[in-house]
Image: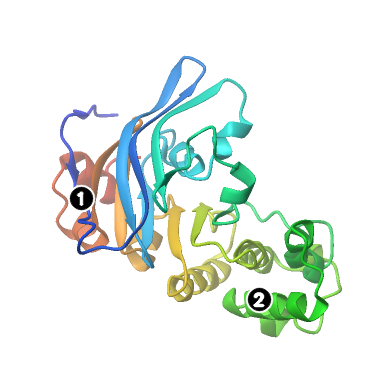
Amino acid sequence: MKEYSLTDTHIIELDKTTHDIALATNDIHVWYGTNEAIKGVSLAFEKHKITSLIGPSGCGKSTYLRSLNRMNDEIAHTKVTGEIMYQNTDINSKQVDVYEMRKHIGMVFQRPNPFSKSIYENITFALKQHGMKDKKKLDEIVETSLKQAALWDQAKDNLHKSALALSGGQQQRLCIARAIAMKPDILLLDEPASALDPISTSKVEETLINLKEDYTIIIVTHNMQQASRISDYTAFFYMGKVIEYDQTRRIFTRPKIQATEDYVSGHFG
């Protein structure tokens, strides 16, 4: 594979006076033991927009995404330095309650991972763990979350049946519903459609486009067409750094950096 200079970069800075910023990172580094997987990434994410993180396998995009709600804390011998600013708080600080923070920054993983419980219990489990007992309120949240995830019509008559009986695409939308039931501000998704068929993928994409009215969405995707279809901004990762970050239409039609152009045009990756 052709080698590209890591000094050639084009990263737009979102002006906080004209953009409403949901989350921003400043000089984030992630080490797995002695391996530096992320090498000083500084990005800002605009509220109620979808931002895609793209790049070749092993470039660090999923590692960076997991750092945004401290999921890398779960991995042994991992160190994360730099600031992750959310609501004027550095959530990378040891003083931050990680579990409380994750109520505001939710995550959906690559493969659907519903609990081995009913559809209803999948959505209410975390709410009950946080002390919610009002059945009427729980019922309302289940209905709202499933509607937002475009799953209510298929699930409303089967709420107390196993979530594992749903199709793969429906399970993934259930996982989205489960995440948004906590009413987060930000939703992180790590290749949420990579294990799905084209029809299910289309439904997940449509769901995400509708959800950005209420949430800020950051998604890792290896699918260039998906990134171009659904995202407002795109960041191109290469060897642990962000090489280019701009509005999606510019990334895919007029990229500033040769490595970006080669990647989005399919010349490597």
Q: Residues within 10 Å of mark 1 (few under 14, many from 20)?
A: few
Sequence-wise, which precedes: disc 2 or disc 1? 1
Displayed quadrant of residue 195:
bottom right
Q: Nearer the viewer, residue 188 or 214?
A: 214
Coloring scheme of the render? rainbow
- Where, quadrant-wise, is the C terminus in this rendering? top left
- Which label sits on residue 26? none
Question: Which residue is labeled 2 in the image?
Answer: 146
Displayed quadrant of residue 169:
bottom right
Give the alpha-carbon distance from disc 2 to disc 1, as whole Å: 35 Å
Q: Is residue 163 above or below residue 63?
A: below
> What's the amino acid at mark 1?
Glu
The residue at the point 51 percent across, 41 percent down is 66
Q: Nearer the viewer, residue 160 or 26?
A: 26
- Where, quadrant-wise, is the N terminus in this rendering? top left
Q: Is residue 233 above or below residue 13?
A: below
Question: Which residue is labeled 1 in the image?
Answer: 13
The residue at the point 75 percent across, 83 percent down is 156
> What's the amino acid at mark 2?
Leu
Numbered disc 1: secondary structure: loop
Q: Residues within 10 Å of mark 2 (few under 14, many from 20)?
A: many
Question: What is the x, y in percent for residue 112?
Answer: 66, 56
Q: Nearer the viewer, residue 35 or 253?
A: 35
